[in-house]
Amino acid sequence: MIIGVDVGGTNTDAVLMDGAALIASRKLPTTADVGDGIVDAIREVLKRSEIPSERIRCVAIGTTHFTNAFVAREGLLNVGLIRIALPASSGVLPLSGWPSGLASAIGDSMVLVGGGYHVDGSVDSELDELAVRDAARQFRRKGLKTVAISALFSPVNDSMEKRAEEIVHNEMPGVSVTRSSEIGSLGLLERENAAIMNASLAELSSKVVKSIGRALSELEIEAPFFLSQNDGTLMTAEAAEDYPVLTFASGPTNSMRGAAFLSGATDALVADIGGTTTDIGSLSNGFPRESSMTADIGGVRTNFRMPDILALGLGGGSLVSQRGGGVAIGPRSVGYRLLEQAKVFGGGTFTASDAAVAAGYARMGEPSRVADLPRDAVEAVVGEIHRMLAEGVDRMKTSAEPIPLVLVGGGSVLISEEIPGVSEIIVPDSAAVANAVGASIALVGGEVDSVYSYEAMGRDAALEAAREQASQAAIDAGAKSGTVQITNIEEIPLSYVPGALVRLRIKAAGELALSGMSA
């Protein structure tokens, strides 16, 4: 049996799954301490199911903790950066385009040194090892605890980044090091940004992973735990501690995978309506459509994989206000304080949930508490809720053809009317905990993103080599070898470059290998 948990900004959801069967579920308000909320939610599903903890084979957890911390600039470390790219990339400095407040939180310890590769992996300039050593010594004197290393075209050839890491560890024993080739793809600046972001979260990731481990120990669950990545696959706790940025946007991804599982829809739009936001995405063959645009996190451009998600400031806890003779909903929300502050629960704040209850189609709290709300105000709010969702759906559609819409999340009760451009609205059973279901059914993935010469290898041989690398990466990450399948292939010819060079991005995924784990 597998427990899936999703820690959101408003609620922490947990489910107990036995194969494809959902045995028990629980939704509780998110707590200030991640571990406390996880303990409470898991304890409830174990109690409801009457399943002893020793029968749990693994725990899969999705969390927005790292995303929220970075955007809010909380718990970030000062980062030392070594960019290996001179003389090729001195025109644009590190942290260019970062919001000033966020750049200040990261610090100004940025050093450019000689080195880097061409797009085909050949040397552009030799690594200046003395400069790397001097940079590490400078960082040590400043007392830095974390270092990011980026090099020109390092996803194609990571040798210089690895050598720089060795030098840094020699000069700074115990320091946390992030190599950009482990996180992002070819674009130097966006990949470097992702590495810096990851390095800034090094201390927080250690605390969160240890907190989760203590929580499971308190529950006497000895099974291993995994964290959800933003491509819908799982990674080990150890990997999550090293690469917390790969959890960014894992919440919406889990919701979409859970929506596909619960509804049976493979090609549809999904709207995950929570307490604070509505995340709209598109399913293609049961997996979230990946964004083709550069991901923007807290105002910082990155290029690691992200689902194509449109976030709206619409949720069950969204505040209702007057604006320009009409009503406005969100983006501010009472969040996890909904049960305290919403009118329907005895509070004094007018929220979207209050309007839905007053209109008679949603059931929660005490309806008598919102019976005196003006009818015209309630109708205006309900109309605005549906208008906002309809606009979001229209923005996410890729054609004029009607498409199914799957509603999940605790806030799915806000929707009662038809949405233009939608062929049918599906609200599956257990829709409120779809995100936790998505975490529990997640596969283990691997990816290769590199440049191959079709002239030297031939297309078939290059594709086969890349497939094998991606499959092995999935197995190394914990996938069962017999279940690994290729889930996506992208061929991107590199124009104006000799040798018929092609960038291949291939993903593979397989079932979690649970052999040897608790039965």
Image: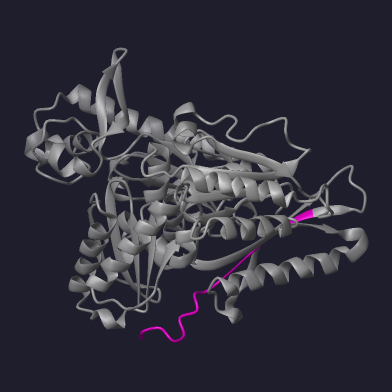
Q: Residue at x 67, y 59 (%)?
A: 162
Q: Position of residue 414 (x, y in %)?
A: 29, 41
Q: Does residue 123 belong to the magenta stretch?
A: no
Q: Does residue 513 belong to the magenta stretch?
A: yes
Relative to the observer, which residue lies in front, 371 or 68? 68
Figure check: 270 above or below 464: above
Relative to the observer, which residue lies in front, 458 or 363? 458
Report if residue 165 is visible in the image: yes
Q: Which residues are magenta?
A: 503-519
Q: Position of residue 84 (x, y in %)?
A: 70, 46
* Image quarter of the C terminus: bottom left
Relative to the observer, which residue lies in front, 455 or 117? 117
Q: Is residue 390 left or right of residue 334?
A: right
Q: Which residue sits furthest top?
A: 324
* Image quarter of the N terminus: bottom left
Q: Is residue 368 left or right of residue 467?
A: left
Report if residue 434 is visible in the image: no
The mark tally for this picture is: 0
Q: Residue at x 28, y 76 (%)?
A: 221
